[in-house]
Amino acid sequence: MEFFGALERTEINDVLETGILFRYNHEAQRNNIYKAREFEAEVAKLVGANYAHAVSSGSTAALCAMVAAGIGAGDEVIVPPFTYIATIEAVLMVGALPVFADIDDTLCLSADSIRRAITPRTKGVCLVHMCGQMADMGAIMAVINEHKLVLVEDAGQAMGASYKGVSTGLWGKTGAYSFDFFKIATAGEGGVMVTNDEQAYKHADSFSDHGHDHIGTNRGMEQHPILGFNYRISELHAAVGLVQTRRVPDIIQKNNAHKKQLMATLGAIPGVSFARIPDPDGDSATFLNLLLPDTESAGRVLAELNAAGVGGFNYWFTNMYHFINQWDHIKQMRTASALPIEKFGAPQDYNSLDLPGAQSVIGRLISFGIRASWTTDEVAALAENVGTAIRKAILIEA
Ligand SMILES: *Cc1c(COP(=O)(O)O)cnc(C)c1O
């Protein structure tokens, strides 16, 4: 969401000049301009995927990822209690049942907790890589493979992150990225599903456009192998998304330099630690994720940060909508219509979940969005200001 310029405008003007804002067909008028296809090619290249399919949002990309992975009615899907709410909604929207497992200091699901949440009805896991960092893939893949679970990755916050050289989104059957306004690259609104499986790709391609098979040049004569819906992206959104995707490697490199500088300074303060990054070389570094000794001291640090106007946010004291403590509608199963939990019943009592990892980590976490455009001096000033707030808040305790 940081950098916009002439490149984005040029790509948008290409679309406006032809007047074809629809991604399919209109071959005669479009002057060979296919921005959605180019956008998909850029994302596939960035992450090393065989296939990428662009849709209207990260939420609909997650939904397509579920469908394309073969997750459906009555299947239990293991999910984290710390994620953007769209992950849980996507599971419900395909008729599946969310089963909450616990997170650890990676901010993501832990392998042990996934193992404990498995039942005979478990079909898969929707793993979410939170706050720009990737989960502990070595341990998690061991459980996935041992129990032959279907893995879907909601990498809405972690496009460009990797573990031992393999990108988010490519560890399981399908993965999803978001291009909403707040993500590392934005199309205004948009999302991309990636996969290395041709069948899964074709499934998503049809599902996201009312089942069209997209074969030939006459839309009116196409076949419809499956039912679907409209989750299409427009050419205008794709035009912005493709330029933004090209900017990602540079942003990640700069973010990492800033994050290292911040961690070196703040890590020297007693009581300060950071969310664990299983492979630091693969961090997208969109956030600095600071951990304090307990929820109480984090609250005091937040108050100091606020008073000094330094920034920093937390998912415990706010209604950021990323943490199960704020999801009363799910706990009370208030769904607008007959979503699956009404028919099948909830697979767990969502009101009495035992999630000690999440309850400990989320209260202690303070995150700071990192901006690639910062200068070294600006980063030093931020480190100084955050450090001052922490020392003040922790001094009160001593
Ligand atoms: C942002 C986000 C989404 C949803 O993306 P939208 O493009 O806003 O629909 C899904 N999952 C995660 C983890 C996200 O951070």
Image (cartoon, grey):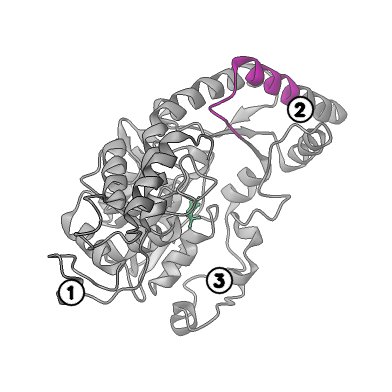
**Which residue is denoted by mark 3 in the rendering?**
349
Of the pair 144 and 380, the residue shown nearer to us? 380
| Mark 2: few/some/many CA within 10 Å (<14, 14-19, 20+) | many
Of the pair 359 and 343, the residue shown nearer to us? 343
Residue drawn at point x = 62 percent, y = 57 percent: 321
Magenta residues (range): 369-387
**In the rendering, at what x and y percent does residue 142 appear?**
30, 45
Vertical arrangement, residue 248 with respect to residue 56, above or below: above
Mark 3 and mark 1 in contact? Answer it, CB < 8 Å. Answer: no
For the stretch drawn in magenta, what is the main secondary structure? helix
Q: Residue furthest right?
A: 396
Disc assigned to residue 321: none
| Mark 3: few/some/many CA within 10 Å (<14, 14-19, 20+) | few
* Circle 2 SS class: helix
Q: Is residue 243 left or right of residue 302?
A: left
Q: Does residue 87 appear anywhere in the picture?
A: yes
Between discs 3 and 1, the one toward the N terminus = 1
Between discs 2 and 1, the one toward the N terminus = 1
* Circle 3 SS class: loop
Residue type highlighted by circle 1: Pro
**In the rendering, at what x and y percent does residue 250 appear?**
42, 26
Disc assigned to residue 225: 1
Vertical arrangement, residue 72 with respect to residue 185, above or below: below
| Mark 1: few/some/many CA within 10 Å (<14, 14-19, 20+) | some
**In the rendering, at what x and y percent does residue 178 appear?**
44, 50
Q: Does residue 170 appear anywhere in the picture?
A: no
Disc assigned to residue 390: 2
